[in-house]
Amino acid sequence: MLDLPQELKVAEEFWNYLGGAGAFEDLLDCFELAGLEMQQEIDAYFRKFK
């Protein structure tokens, strides 16, 4: 029922379709920077589950 190459996009294909070429890499860079800036808070949060 679906034309998979034309109608189903995930991960890199999805984000580049929405934001243009390179959007997926830009998004990953943003998450990496946020993770580095919030590393102590993230670590403290997950320590609760050990």
Image (cartoon, helix red, strand yellow):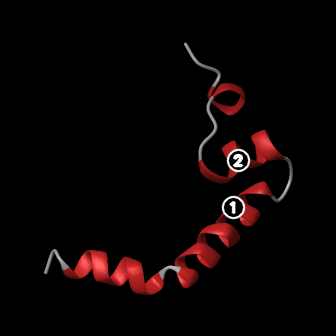
Marks 2 and 1: CB-CB under 8 Å? yes
Q: Give coordinates of residue 46: x percent, y percent.
A: 26, 76
Q: Residue at x 29, y 75 (%)?
A: 45
Residue ID at (22%, 82%)? 47
Instruction: Tell me residue 31's x, y (percent).
Output: 60, 68
Q: Residue furthest top?
A: 1
Residue 27 got which mark? 1
Amino acid tagged 1? Leu
Specify the quadrant that holds the N terminus: top right
For the C terminus, the image quarter is bottom left
Seen from the viewer's position, the closer of residues 1 and 12 is: 12
Q: Earlier in the sequence, mark 2 or mark 1?
A: 2
- The kind of secondary structure element at disc 1 is helix
Q: Nearer the viewer, residue 14 or 38?
A: 38
Residue at image x 56%, y 84%? 36
Against 29, is 16 above or below?
Answer: above
Q: Which residue is mark 2?
A: 15
Residue found at the far left of this picture:
50
x, y percent for residue 22? 82, 59
Q: Nearer the viewer, residue 33 or 14?
A: 33
Q: Amino acid at mark 2?
A: Trp
Few, some or many C-alpha atoms within 10 Å of disc 2 (few <14, some 14-19, many ≥20)? some
What's the distance in space between the residues labelled 2 and 1, CA to CA?
8 Å
